[in-house]
Image: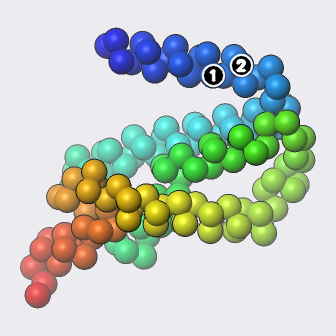
């Protein structure tokens, strides 16, 4: 309970200070990204709890929103007033996706051991879990 309160107070303090210097568009983009981050982490936790195996083809797509990388774009955008037409342009979204993939791959190589092996949601454990789950040689 104390940890939740501390986290809540930290987030409130961060948001209060960030709003003083953030442009409206930057604040909106951060809020959207952070909301998606929280929602997808809940989904990811449910998948782990239910032993759902994410196929390799969908692994990076599944990890993009729940590594928190999109929220970090806020640091670079905080004082900029980027119009939605530019921020959501397909080329920019594709570039953001590639950046998030690089972050994911780095996270997997650095912190893969923190993921439960039985969840099969760490790329390092994926091949082993996938073959074990399907009883493949």
Quadrant (top left/top right/bottom left/bottom right) for the C terminus: bottom left
Residue sticking out furthest to the front: 110
Position in image of residue 100 (x %, y %): 58, 60
Residue 47 circle label:
none
Q: Quadrant of residue 127?
A: bottom left
Residue 102 falls in image quadrant = bottom right
Residue labelled with disc 1:
14
Question: Which residue reaches farthest bottom?
Answer: 137
| Residue at x-position 82% and y-position 25% | 21
Residue depicted at x 37% and y 74%: 56
Quadrant position of residue 136: bottom left
Q: How many marks can you see? A: 2
Q: Are marks 2 and 1 in contact (CB under 8 Å)?
A: yes
Q: Which residue is mark 2?
A: 17
Q: Is residue 15 above or below residue 81?
A: above
Q: Position of residue 47 (x, y in %)?
A: 30, 51
Q: Is residue 128 visible?
A: yes
Give the alpha-carbon distance from disc 2 to disc 1, as whole Å.
5 Å
Q: Is residue 97 left or right of residue 63?
A: right
Q: x, y (%) of residue 83? A: 89, 47
Measured as percent of width and height from the top left, residue 111 is found at: 35, 55
Seen from the viewer's position, the closer of residues 49 and 30 is 30
Instruction: Find numbered disc 2 in the image and state the secondary structure of the residue it sits on.
Output: helix
Which residue is pictured at 41% across the width and 67% down the height? 59
């Amino acid at each position: 309970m104390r940890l939740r309160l501390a986290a809540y107070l930290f987030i409130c303090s961060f948001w209060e200070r960030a709003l003083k210097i953030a442009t409206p568009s930057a604040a909106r983009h951060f809020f959207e990204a952070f909301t998606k981050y929280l929602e997808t982490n809940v989904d990811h936790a449910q998948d782990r709890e239910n032993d759902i195996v994410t196929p390799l083809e969908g692994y990076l797509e599944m990890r993009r929103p729940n590594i928190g990388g999109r929220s970090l774009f806020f640091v670079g955008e905080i004082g900029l007033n980027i119009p939605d037409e530019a921020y959501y342009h397909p080329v920019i979204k594709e570039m953001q996706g590639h950046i998030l993939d690089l972050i994911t791959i780095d996270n997997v190589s650095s912190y893969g051991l923190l993921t439960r092996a039985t969840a099969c949601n760490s790329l390092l454990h994926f091949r082993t879990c996938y073959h074990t789950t399907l009883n493949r040689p």
